[in-house]
Structures are given as structure tokens and as C-alpha cells.
């Protein structure tokens, strides 16, 4: 196989002009995860070429001057880097060639590959290694029907869980003695709905890329995006990272779902009915989805930690070359900002729900311990205590899984660590280069109002939970011998 010379990290290294000889089939476990999460949508997920933003603009400029751009959407979309790289269905547009099929070579005037474009092919060692779908072994995992099938499964899953929500709300609505338990149960459904809704938004962005161009976070759930993250981790050689975490993320929701099933069928003596079966099914399937989503956050998080380390080496060896460093920097940061926005949106949905669940559980436990009526009936007592334990276990699993997956609360710390290490690389030489780089970093790290909004909603959740707890204890279900009956609805 032909091997050539190309510069990367400021020095010439030997790279293959076609395929990386060390490329191995990626583990089927990754494709199974993407398939189970209904993430496959595009027919082509690995483009023949990847172009940096500078090369993309140059190609688009030549096409405009040649009169090849006829579609008005091209002006709106083909200058948006995330759309060009991840969202366009047409593989030629995804490669930056345009719908007319004009193939402009990636070689510059000296005949060598663009060094910034080369950084888009970095493997785990910072080496340039091009690959194809055949090389990494996608094969039948992504067939022609994968896109419509993923979309239909997501729509079906959302319809199913919304039907169950409407079903139990219809039976609990208007009962003051059950409002606290109804709100606690709703927090679980909000968390379980998180991933299907995010994934559906990602599909809509791929379906209508120009119309939803500002929905940048949705690209973080695109298979093309995730394959690039796997490329940086070198999973062809190293395999799936965090296999034990993946196992735990799948096991813990399953244990909680099994506990819920036992409460319904054994402890409360509800028996088997449509409501019991549906709620148990939702707990298993959507709990597994939540666990896989947590693993996906972990997968993307560690890939950026590795890529930022590679970027530090690149800066060190190309100090003073502003074109190369800024190009590689923004190529990585644009991807990271998508992930950061996805994490912020997840926090915005999850944390107020979890805060309300914690506050509601504390209130519920206080009311349960402050009354003696529940002690008169063993069935009511068991149902009340096991329901409370179930609620606490759901909160614990949801929160701890997220904190482990992210290694913290927000994603900002990943970029902050990169900036802190970058400051140690600064030298007295090339002060203009470092000054301009600092301006770029300041632009990326500008403040966001997401934390403030999340905090406000969290305080509202605390107030609502404790306000619901001011109701008369004697009106609670476990004080009128209906605790086990109301649980069965």
C-alpha cells in the first residue's frame, strides 16, 4: 500500500495516503450501542475526506465564482461547519464537495496535504490515519433502512411513555392526598424522557439541517460525530473504554426496575394488570436507554480529554504558526461546544427534577414518620416504606451515574484544565501568537446563563416540594387504608 510523507505536529512523519495499516475492526459492542440507542440515520457515516473550515470556505468560494451554487440553502448551510461535517445526507456535500459533485483536490500549491485537515484524522497517538466504513467494520449495522427505523422506534417509544403518563395522571389527577406522590413519579418520567427527546431532536436536525442550524448540540448525538470521538480514542486497537462502567450503567437501572416490579406484584399485591406490565416495561427499557446515554457522555468526555492533550503537543511543536494552531484549535473546540451544550441541556432538565425528587422524598419521609396511622396496617406500612426506598434509589442511580459519566457536574472543567495546561506552555517568544490565542480562548469561555437558569428552577422545585408537604397528614393515602390500592393505578 502506498505510503507518503506529510507534516504533522511540525515534523514530517510517514502516513498512508489511503488507509492506516494499523486500522482494526472496531468492536461490535460500539455498533450495538449505537443501534440500540437508535442513533443510525445517515447512510454514509465516514466521508472519504475531511476538510478544515478554511478549506471548506475556499471550496465554496470557488464554486460561487464558477456559478455552481444555485440552491439558496447552500448559502445558509454550507458555511456552517457543523452542518457540512456532520449533518448533510448527501455524502458529497458531507465531504465539502457540494451537491454538484465538484471535486476540488485537498492538495495545496506545494503538493502536500493541508496540515489542519490532517488533524481531523488524528488517532489516539496524534498520528494521521485515514479509514473507511469497511475498515472499521460498520457493515450491516448501518443499512438502508437504519434511518427510518431509528426514527420510527423513537417516535413509538415517545408515544408509549406519553400514553403511560396520561394514563396514570388521569387516575391520580384531582386527588389532593396523592399530589406529592404524583409529582415525585413525574420526576422519574422526566428523566426517562430525556434521552428519547434529545435523540429525536438530533434526527430532526439531520432531516432539516438548514432550518435547525442553531440546534448545534444535536450534532453531538450524530453517529458521524461519535465515530470521530472513537477515532481519537483508538478503539480499534484499545477496544471500548470503561467496560466496567458500561456494565454498571446497565445493571443499576435493571436492579431498580426489578425492585419496582416486586413492589407492584408481590409487596403491594397489585397482581398482573396492564398498568403494572406497562410501568415495569418502561422502567426496564427506558432505564437501559438512560444507562447507555450516561455511557455515551462518558465516551465523549474522555475522548475530548485525550484530544485536548494532543492539541497541547501540537501547540508546543507548532508554536508561532498561528494558522495551523488556530485551525486545529477551532476544529476541536467547535466539536467540544456541541458536547458542552448537550451536557448543559441535560443538566437543565435533570437537576431541577432531581432536586424536586429529593425535596419531595424528604417531605414524604417526614410525613410518614410523623404519623402513627400507617402502623396500624402492615400492608400499608410495607408499601409506604418500599415506595420511599424505590424513590430514593431512582434518585441515587440517576445522579451518581451522571456524576461518574461526566467526572463532575459541568463539561466546562475539561476546557478549563486544557487552558490551565496551555498557560504553562507559554514562553517569552512569539508573544503576539500567544496574545491572539488568548483572545480566541476568551471568546470560547464567555459566560453562559445556563447555570443561573438551572439554579432558579432548582429553587422553584424545592419550594414546590415543601409546599406540597404542608397538606394535612390525615389526608394522605397511607392514613385511609388506600396506599396499596392507589399504587396499583
Image: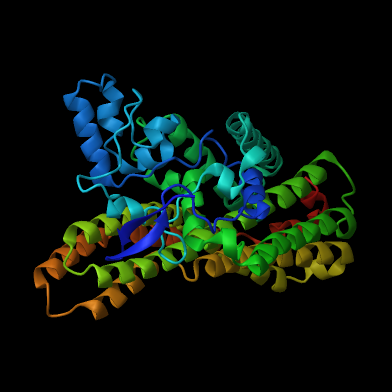
Residue 380 sits in quarter: bottom right
Query: In the image, is residue 57 above or below residue 383?
Result: above
Compared with residue 199, is residue 91 higher up or lower down, i.e. above or below? above
Can you tell which quarter of the image residue 476 is in? bottom right
x%, y% of residue 295? 59, 60
Spot occupied by residue 3 in the image (x, y as percentages of width and height):
42, 54
Q: In this rendering, does residue 285 appear at all?
A: yes
Q: Residue at x 87, y 60 (%)?
A: 267
In which quadrant is the C terminus drawn?
top right
Query: Residue 83 lies in what quarter of the image?
Result: top left
Q: Number of marks in the image?
A: 0
Q: Camera-side residue: 459 or 91?
A: 91
Residue 352 in picture, x, y percent from top left: 49, 58
Q: Is residue 336 left or right of residue 263?
A: left
Residue 85 higher or lower than 99, as above or below: below
Choose between 12 and 242: the one closer to the eye: 12
* Residue visible at 86% across and 57% down in the picture: 268
Q: Is residue 448 left or right of residue 361?
A: left
Q: Nearer the viewer, residue 128 or 460?
A: 128
Amino acid at each position: 500500500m502506498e505510503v507518503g510523507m506529510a507534516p504533522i505536529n511540525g515534523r514530517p512523519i510517514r502516513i498512508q495516503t489511503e488507509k492506516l495499516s494499523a486500522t482494526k475492526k472496531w468492536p461490535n459492542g460500539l455498533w450495538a450501542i449505537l443501534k440500540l440507542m437508535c442513533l443510525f440515520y445517515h447512510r454514509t457515516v465516514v466521508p472519504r475526506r475531511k476538510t478544515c473550515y478554511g478549506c471548506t470556505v475556499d471550496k465554496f468560494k470557488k464554486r460561487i465564482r464558477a456559478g455552481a451554487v444555485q440552491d439558496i440553502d447552500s448559502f445558509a448551510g454550507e458555511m456552517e461547519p457543523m452542518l457540512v461535517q456532520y449533518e448533510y445526507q448527501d455524502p458529497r456535500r458531507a465531504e465539502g464537495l457540494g451537491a454538484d459533485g465538484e471535486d476540488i483536490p485537498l492538495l495545496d500549491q506545494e503538493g502536500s496535504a493541508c496540515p489542519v485537515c490532517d488533524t481531523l484524522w488524528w488517532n489516539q497517538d496524534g498520528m494521521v490515519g485515514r479509514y473507511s466504513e469497511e475498515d472499521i467494520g460498520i457493515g450491516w449495522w448501518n443499512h438502508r433502512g437504519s434511518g427510518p427505523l431509528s426514527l420510527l422506534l423513537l417516535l413509538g417509544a415517545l408515544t408509549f411513555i406519553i400514553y403511560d403518563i396520561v394514563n396514570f395522571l388521569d387516575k391520580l389527577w384531582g386527588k389532593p392526598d396523592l399530589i406529592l406522590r404524583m409529582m415525585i413519579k413525574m420526576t422519574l418520567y422526566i428523566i426517562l424522557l430525556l434521552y428519547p427527546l434529545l435523540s429525536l431532536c438530533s434526527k430532526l436536525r439531520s432531516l432539516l439541517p438548514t432550518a435547525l442550524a442553531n440546534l448545534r448540540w444535536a450534532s453531538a448525538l450524530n453517529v458521524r460525530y461519535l465515530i470521530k470521538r472513537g477515532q481519537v480514542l483508538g478503539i480499534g486497537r484499545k477496544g471500548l473504554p470503561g467496560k466496567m462502567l458500561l456494565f454498571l450503567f446497565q445493571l443499576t437501572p435493571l436492579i431498580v426496575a426489578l425492585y419496582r416490579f416486586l413492589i407492584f406484584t408481590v409487596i403491594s399485591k397489585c397482581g398482573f394488570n396492564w398498568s403494572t406490565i406497562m410501568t415495569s416495561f418502561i422502567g426496564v427499557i427506558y432505564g437501559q436507554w438512560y444507562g447507555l446515554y450516561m455511557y455515551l457522555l462518558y465516551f465523549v468526555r474522555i475522548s475530548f480529554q485525550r484530544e485536548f492533550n494532543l492539541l497541547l503537543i501540537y501547540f508546543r511543536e507548532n508554536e508561532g504558526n498561528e494558522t495551523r494552531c488556530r485551525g486545529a484549535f477551532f476544529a476541536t473546540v467547535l466539536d467540544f461546544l456541541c458536547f458542552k451544550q448537550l451536557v448543559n441541556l441535560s443538566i437543565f432538565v435533570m437537576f431541577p427534577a432531581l432536586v424536586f425528587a429529593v425535596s419531595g422524598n424528604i417531605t414524604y419521609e417526614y410525613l410518614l414518620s410523623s404519623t402513627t396511622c400507617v402502623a396500624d396496617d402492615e400492608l400499608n406500612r410495607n408499601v409506604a416504606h418500599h415506595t420511599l426506598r424505590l424513590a430514593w434509589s431512582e434518585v441515587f442511580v440517576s445522579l451518581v451515574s451522571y456524576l461518574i459519566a461526566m467526572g463532575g457536574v459541568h463539561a466546562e472543567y475539561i476546557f478549563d484544565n486544557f487552558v490551565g495546561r496551555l498557560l504553562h506552555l507559554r514562553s517569552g517568544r512569539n508573544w503576539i501568537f500567544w496574545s491572539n490565542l488568548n483572545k480566541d480562548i476568551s471568546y470560547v469561555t464567555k459566560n453562559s446563563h445556563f447555570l443561573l437558569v438551572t439554579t432558579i428552577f432548582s429553587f422553584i422545585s424545592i419550594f414546590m416540594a415543601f409546599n406540597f408537604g404542608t397538606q394535612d397528614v390525615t389526608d394522605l393515602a397511607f392514613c385511609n387504608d388506600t396506599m396499596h390500592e392507589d399504587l396499583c393505578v
